[in-house]
Image (cartoon, coloured by chain):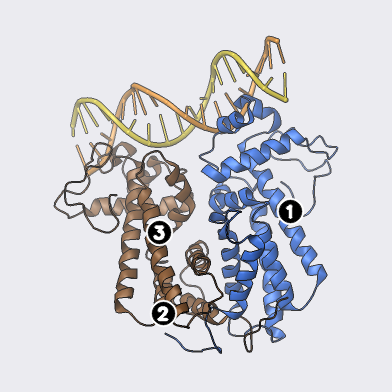
Chain colours: A blue, B brown, C orange, D yellow
Amino acid sequence: MEDVNTRKNSGGTATKRQSAKRVPASGAASERRDHLVKLAAEIFARKGFQATTVREIANEAGILSGSLYHHFDSKETIVDEVLSDFLRDLLGRYRAALERGGDPRTVLSEMVRIGFGTLEPHRAAITVMQNDWSYLRSLPGDRFDYLVKAEDEVERLWIEQIKRGQAEGQFRADVDPKLTYRMIRDTIWVAVRWFRPGGKLNTAGLAEHYITVLFDGVATGERSSQRA
Amino acid sequence: MEDVNTRKNSGGTATKRQSAKRVPASGAASERRDHLVKLAAEIFARKGFQATTVREIANEAGILSGSLYHHFDSKETIVDEVLSDFLRDLLGRYRAALERGGDPRTVLSEMVRIGFGTLEPHRAAITVMQNDWSYLRSLPGDRFDYLVKAEDEVERLWIEQIKRGQAEGQFRADVDPKLTYRMIRDTIWVAVRWFRPGGKLNTAGLAEHYITVLFDGVATGERSSQRA
DNA sequence: GTCTATATGAGGATAGAC
DNA sequence: GTCTATCCTCATATAGAC
């Protein structure tokens, strides 16, 4: 993947290896390919990227491992596509929310909803991202540098809103914006480990529950500065 | 590992493979062995369990890979020791806190502090646990079943306190205990991904910051039932 | 307790027929 | 677009000398 921000490289950008078969330059990604990516994502999520063999992926697709290489350069290319698709969608949603505007509390609530809202459509990608992030980043080359780039961009968006909320008096001044962001982020994404559709709460319910706790806390009564 | 609760199997319990060399039955684990385990844990944490080769571990220990097998049955045995040591310590700390007693808010605060408090001494183990949990669980056999057992036990302890707090009126009745526990748990453990000693806050500071947000929320002023 | 040497197997990837 | 066949590399683990 070359850029999380713009879809379908318009033909130019050369990728490292054999510049691959990839998208037919026209822009219409083959459905076959997309299907294979989705299928692989599920296995990556279930067993981890490294533990997943190309033979397994091919098996589940009903073909032999060699045939996979007609569609993809390498195993890395597949996981690359899984992650970049997700990040593109996520960033798009955040930007749209920011364009809609509102006071900091409103915007932040929306961002929390967006986060939880990706849990179902992107469950596999988020799982892979969490479990295999550091391994992928450790690979030689700069292929997965965009992961950090996207992370930084997202962090910036969140922290801006938190700081604005503090400046406007909607959020307490004594919480650390960066730390608070990290805790929110972690809470949302790690939910992918245990969330399963069909439980008591759907992702929208999860989001509202968390928004309540985040803004008002779990303690009863007036704000207590009490420390145990 | 046979039981997270009791240290040093008193000689009986047969492990699956060749029942190994392990601890000299006396109970005094060799320091050499412990050192190797710690060393391996760091590499597991850095690169992931699967991506870590026995050669690397041996290399860093200054011996050859074959020699590692004088100390351990298999790579699995090493990671097993890493994780069970951590869980034994963690459960011990929780139980001690519960024995000290106190009202729910006090106890829960202590539990949060314990969680963050393990971040430094057990950084490697926690990282491995998070990244390789599902892979280890997917291995054939019941070797890593104790992971789930320990997790269940911990969950029980937390939820008990949350429910008690609700019954006694210290915590809001409209939050879901299990969901709240999960969010607390996730927030604490995932911090291992970004926390590094030497930053603005140490783990104790992190704990206090989180306790504040958890109980009172980030919003200013009186409790707002406002929804964005 | 460590080394040398090696068995054994699996995984990613390729070439070329169909 | 898939298959057959296979290369090459690298991993875990073992056996036995020192």
Judging from the image, mark 1 belongs to the subunit labelled: A
Query: Label 2 sits on what residue type?
Result: Pro
Q: Which mark is residue A175?
A: none
The Cα–Cα distance between marks 2 and 1, rounded to whole angstroms, is: 43 Å
Q: Which mark is residue B104?
A: 2
Q: What SS does tag 1 mark?
A: helix
Q: Position of residue A13 (x, y in %)?
A: 78, 43
Q: Earlier in the sequence, mark 3 or mark 2?
A: 2
Q: Which mark is residue A88?
A: 1
> Residue A29's quadrant in the figure?
top right
> Is label 1 or label 3 in front?
3
Judging from the image, mark 3 belongs to the subunit labelled: B
> Residue A153's quadrant in the figure?
bottom right
Q: Position of residue B74 (x, y in %)?
A: 33, 40
Query: Label 1 sits on what residue type?
Result: Arg
Proximity of marks 2 and 1: CB atoms separated by less than 8 Å: no
> Would residue A77 be seen by someone viewing this image from the given angle?
no
Query: Label 3 sits on what residue type?
Result: Asp
Residue at horizontal 70%, vertical 54%?
Answer: A87
Residue placed most toward the observer, A16 or B123: B123
Q: Position of residue A97 (x, y in %)?
A: 77, 66
Residue placed most toward the observer, D5 or B31: D5
The quadrant in which the C terminus of chain A is found is: bottom left
Q: Position of residue B133 (x, y in %)?
A: 45, 50
Q: What SS does tag 3 mark?
A: helix
Judging from the image, mark 2 belongs to the subunit labelled: B
The Cα–Cα distance between marks 1 and 3, rounded to whole angstroms, is: 36 Å
Residue placed most toward the observer, A198 or A225: A198
Q: Is residue B145 above or below residue A97?
A: above
Q: Which mark is residue B152?
A: 3
Residue at horizontal 42%, vertical 61%?
Answer: B123
Q: What SS does tag 2 mark?
A: helix
